[in-house]
Image: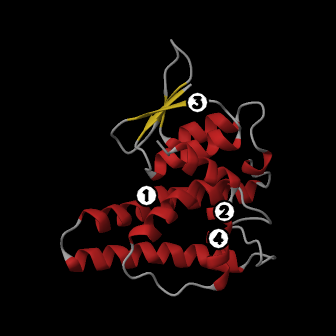
Amino acid sequence: MILQGTQGGPHTRRARLALEAASMDYQFQPCDGDEPTLNIAKGEPPLEGSVEIVDWVLDQPGAPQWWNETDVDQLDDGLYLIELCDGPFSDYVAAFLESDDREQRLEAEACAAGFVDQLTQLLEQATDHTAPALLGSEVGLADFAIWPFIERFQAVAEHLPETALVWQRWCEIMRAHPHWLAVLVAEQP
């Protein structure tokens, strides 16, 4: 399999996380563009976009069970969060990165921080604040699908709001997770 995407881009990192979590062998070829593609086999159409790649990985034998939300309401909530991440949040982060206008940057950053606040509220509902997850009792699909975008935003934001300890703990867990570390190692030349 060949994964093509932007080195270090959040959509590409989401796809890599899914492939790493499922222990799938793949080659990476850097290319321009926001969304990655996965060429599974010659003669088959490529999968386009990180969400389609994640869906495909989840349908494969050996897919990580903790990525498959078993509770239908949890799955719906997770998909909704992913839509918010891929839509408004991602748009705000892009506007923040691309704008030269200080006011536009501050407005975009504040809107993106609103999504962080929304996620923090979910984390505060976790039963175990030492190992919080967005939905359920352990990190799953929503956590991993959203994390690359949050990590990117935190790396560039100039005025991050004060965050709750539970948010900080979630970030620590995600940064130290073996699948995330495998993605970072895979990105090294």
Distance between mark 2 and mark 3 Cα atoms: 22 Å
Q: Which residue is mark 1?
A: 87
Residue 75: percent from the left, percent from the top? 70, 54
Q: Which of marks 3 and 4 precedes in the sequence?
A: 3
88 with respect to 65 (left or right): left
104 with respect to 37 (left or right): left
Distance between mark 4 and mark 1 Cα atoms: 25 Å
Q: Which of marks 3 and 1 precedes in the sequence?
A: 3
Considering only vertical position in the picture, is 11 above or below 26?
Answer: below
The residue type indicated by label 4 comes to: Glu
Tell me what residue is drawn at x 64 percent, y 60 percent. Answer: 143
The quadrant of the picture occupied by the N terminus is top right
Residue 167: percent from the left, percent from the top? 62, 77
Q: Residue 176's mark?
A: 2
Q: Residue 172's mark?
A: 4
Q: Residue 26's mark?
A: 3
Q: Which of these two is toward me, 179 or 107?
A: 179
